[in-house]
Amino acid sequence: MKDISLTGVDRLFLFGQNDQHLAQIEKKYGVSLVARGDKLILDGPDAAVGEADGLLSHLVERIRRGPAIEEAELSELILQSPAPPQYDQIIDGKHVANTYKTIIRARTAGQAEYLKAIDTNDIVFGIGPAGTGKTYLAVAMAVAALRQKQVSRIILARPAVEAGEKLGFLPGSFEDKVDPYLRPLYDALQDLMEPERLRRMQEMKIIEVVPLAYMRGRTLNDSFIILDEAQNTTPQQMKMFLTRLGSHSKAVVTGDITQTDLDENQPSGLVVAPKILTKIPRLSFVRLTEQDVVRNPLVQKIIKAYENYEEADRDPTSVPSR
């Protein structure tokens, strides 16, 4: 048996309508949850109580200490498997992104390491599977740096790997053709800034969203620069991007090395970079895993299933199950 203090916690929010959140936790871990006075009593097998306690303690601290947690995130954390680490292991309150519209914070230990690395280094590589928040957190940190006047502009770049024949058949200007590749960056910006502010800053070139090819020949001072989908860069393109960094600037490179769209015989700049850029001060590599996925919990299982399949495919001794 275990009890958790509910002092300073909005119980209706934590318990959910008709206690649905508590019911989900009871079903997930096989425990009994009863509110008595200012405490929540957990009862059941020791291992199950320990796991449920870890989740509930995390939720209580998130609600009590803030920043504010939303209903959708609370529900997602309850459904997430396994339970997240303790609150203090995830975030110490120092490394958050205070954007124009909201405060963005880490939701996993890996994301906390990522935010800390961005805060304390000039160049950071965020490498990991889809859904781990690599791009979104990088854009949030860029917007926060701009808001706090740590930089004077944001440059967001992506390689357009199909800038040859496939894009050539699309109507419109080159900008129209590459817009689908840049759309995820626009989506992140729109989440973090008011539409009018974003439009004005784009018109003033304070915020630029550009294909990687547009970076050649530039020196970017006093800027926060993000290279997204970097697994689709060649080693030469990666070198070109990294050498754009000017004084008082910061760069974040994000990508998933398992999802490269390059030709089979073309090495990825994101794969080669860690082999070259070793032991360089103020340059950090952060590797996120399926445990850092913050989309639908099913995404974690999909990523793990693909990893298991690829490992078995590489192992000549493995026998496919029938």
Image (cartoon, rainbow, N blue to C red):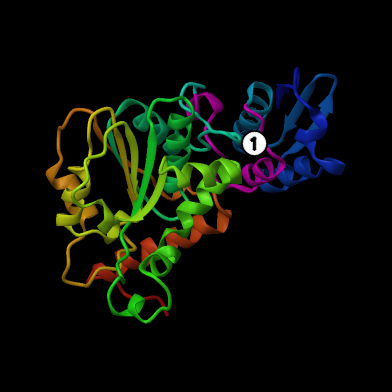
Q: Quadrant of the N terminus?
A: top right
- Write the residue at 75% across / 34% down: 14
Quadrant of image for the C terminus = bottom left
Residue 11 picture quarter:
top right
Taking the spot 39% from the left edge, 29% from the top edge, the residue there is 116
Query: Farthest residue in the left direction?
Result: 276
The location of residue 151, given as percent across then percent down, is 37, 30
Mark 1: which amino acid?
A: Ala
Above/below status of 28 relative to 93: below
Question: Would you say residue 89 sits in the magenta stretch?
Answer: yes
Residue shown at the point (75%, 18%) measured from the top left: 8
**On the image, which quarter does residue 246 sit in?**
top left
Left or right of 12? Residue 215 is: left
Q: Residue at x 66, y 37 (%)?
A: 45
Image position of 215 (left or right of 39): left
Residue range corresponding to the magenta coloring: 67-91
Quick check: is 48 in the magenta stretch?
no
Q: Nearer the viewer, residue 291 or 126?
A: 126
Please determine whether, in this image, residue 173 is positioned above or below residue 16: below
> Percent x, y for residue 75?
69, 45
Secondary-structure class at tag 1: helix
Label 1: few (<14), some (14–19) or many (≥20) C-alpha neighbours in 10 Å = many
Total marks placed? 1
- The front one of 2 and 76 is 76
**Residue 149 at x, y = what percent?**
43, 25
Name the residue that disc number 1 marks.
Answer: 52
Where 73 sits versus 150, above or below?
Answer: below
Q: Residue furthest front?
A: 204
The location of residue 129, given as percent across then percent down, is 40, 54
